[in-house]
Amino acid sequence: MSQFPTDPKKIKAQITRYERELRKEYETHRFIDDGYGKRYLLGPLYLLLGDVAGAVKSFAWFDKMFPDDMGEPAHSLCWTLALYRAGDMTGACHKLLQTMLSNLYVLPQLLGRKQPRLNIWHGSNISEPAYLEYIAPELWKLWDAAALQWAQTLYESAEFVRVRTRYIEIYGQLQTGPVGARRSQLVAESFALRKITLGQA
């Protein structure tokens, strides 16, 4: 992810510009292509500004406009924090789970843990450990001690461990499994794991 401005005025200007450009593209074409990825930057920018309500609103807009978008881990990490700070603990727990599965190295990095490269199939570049290098330092720093403790408690919980363990097992099998019905079944199960809520794990 690109570096972010630190001056609040510049952050506000960047938000205004991105929102205007995305709105204009939608009004012109009735869809948003956004090859630059501005949609992934708006929520984090609001958080950097300290505007939790604006961040939550922006993430809700993203969910509405891009319902099939798998997103990207840094965006999901910020979305988790916005829900946590807004007091939506159910939503924050679910989004933390999605963040964990979007890149298995992000939460260990957040919590100051060493996570060696897993012997699994990494389906895209955003699931690779090298992706961590592209997360702006400013986004890690948004997490205060209380938020980190909350994330750590969930990360170590039985439900999160169970989901994570099964997810790693699936992608370990996908690393060598041939194309066919069994592989399709495993992929479908991995997607289902991203959608479960606490209590269903």
Image (tube, helix red, strand yellow):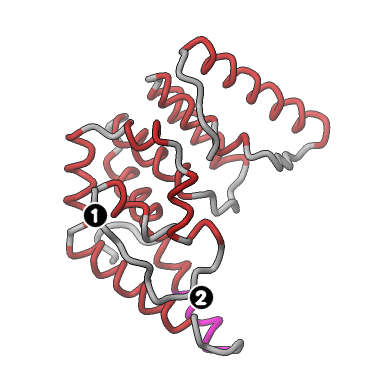
Whether residue 152 sits left or right of residue 81 in the image: it is left
Across and down, in percent, residue 78 comes to: 40, 38
Q: Quadrant of the C terminus?
A: bottom left
Label 1 Cα crowd, 10 Å radius (few <14 / some 14-19 / many 20+): few
- Amino acid type, label 2: Val
Report which quarter residue 55 is drawn in. top left
Disc nearer the start of the sequence (2/1): 1
Quadrant in the picture for residue 32: top right
Q: Is 183 or 199 nearer to us in this picture?
A: 183
Q: Which secondary structure lies at badge 2?
A: helix
Q: Quadrant of residue 162?
A: bottom left
Residue 113 is tagged as 1
189 to 74, vertically: above or below: below
Residue at the spot of label 2: 187
- Label the magenta part by its dominant secondary structure: helix
Confirm or deny contact between disc 2 and disc 1 (CB under 8 A). no
- Image x and y of residue 77, in percent: 39, 43
Question: In the rendered structure, which segment of residues is drawn in magenta?
Answer: 181-189
Residue 167 belongs to magenta span: no
Residue flagged by tag 1: what amino acid is it?
Arg
